[in-house]
C-alpha cells in the first residue's frame, strides 16, 4: 500500500473530503490531491504532520505486509538510515557546543540543552522505526530463503 492510499483510507475513515482535509491542514488542495494520488512523495516530517492530525503512529505509513520484500522497502530503510546519520551528527555537534559553554546558567545553554533533548528524542524514535524495518525485512528474507531451498 502506498502512502497516498493510506492517506485516502484515513480521510475516508474520518468521513472528510480532500478539500476539507486540505483546508484543515493548511495545505493547498492540489497538493493534497497529489499526495493521495502518489504524484508527490511525502517526506518524513510531512508524514509526521499527517500522523498527528489523524492521531495515528507514523508507522501506519510505512508498515504494510504488501510493502515488504519490495525494492521500496530497502529505499525507505536507506532513507531512514540517512535521517539517523544526520540526526546523530547534529546531536554530536550540539553536545560539543554545550560542552564548550562556560556559563551553564545562561539562556544559550538552556536553549541548546532543550534542543539537545528534543533531537535526542527524535533520534531514538528514528532508531526504533529503523530497527523494526530491519527486523521485519530480515524475517521476510529468512522466510523467502526457507521457501526456496
Image: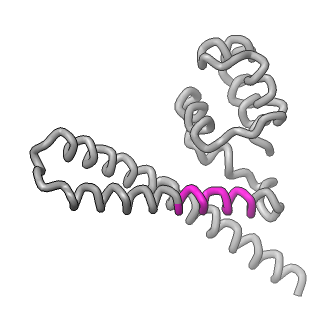
Q: Is residue 74 left or right of residue 103?
A: right
Which segment did they paint magenta?
74-85
Q: Is residue 5 above or below residue 139?
A: above
Identified at 64% across, 62% down, the residue is 133
> Could you tell me if residue 101 is visible in this image?
yes
The residue at the far right in this view is 148
Rendering quarter of residue 149: bottom right
Q: Nearer the viewer, residue 48 or 138?
A: 48
Q: Position of residue 87 (x, y in %)?
A: 47, 56
Q: Position of residue 19 (x, y in %)?
A: 73, 12
Identified at 21% across, 59% down, the residue is 100
Q: Is residue 5 left or right of residue 125?
A: right
Q: Is residue 80 above or below residue 7?
A: below
Q: Which quadrant is the N terminus positioned in?
A: top right
Rendering quarter of residue 22: top right
Q: Is residue 30 left or right of residue 122?
A: right
Secondary structure that dominates the magenta span: helix
Amino acid at each position: 500500500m502506498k502512502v497516498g492510499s493510506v492517506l485516502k483510507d484515513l480521510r475516508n475513515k474520518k468521513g472528510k473530503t480532500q478539500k476539507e482535509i486540505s483546508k484543515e491542514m493548511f495545505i493547498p488542495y492540489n497538493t493534497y490531491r497529489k499526495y493521495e494520488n502518489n504524484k508527490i512523495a511525502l517526506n518524513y516530517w510531512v508524514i509526521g504532520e499527517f500522523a498527528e492530525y489523524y492521531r495515528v503512529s507514523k508507522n501506519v505509513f510505512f508498515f504494510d505486509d504488501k510493502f515488504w520484500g519490495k525494492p521500496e522497502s530497502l529505499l525507505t530503510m536507506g532513507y531512514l538510515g540517512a535521517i539517523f546519520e544526520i540526526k546523530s551528527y547534529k546531536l554530536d555537534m550540539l553536545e560539543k557546543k554545550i560542552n564548550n559553554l562556560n556559563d551553564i546558567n545562561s539562556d544559550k545553554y538552556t536553549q541548546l540543552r532543550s534542543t539537545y533533548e528534543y533531537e535526542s528524542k527524535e533520534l531514538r524514535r528514528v532508531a526504533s522505526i529503523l530497527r523494526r524495518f530491519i527486523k521485519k525485512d530480515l524475517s521476510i528474507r529468512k522466510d523467502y530463503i526457507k521457501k526456496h531451498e
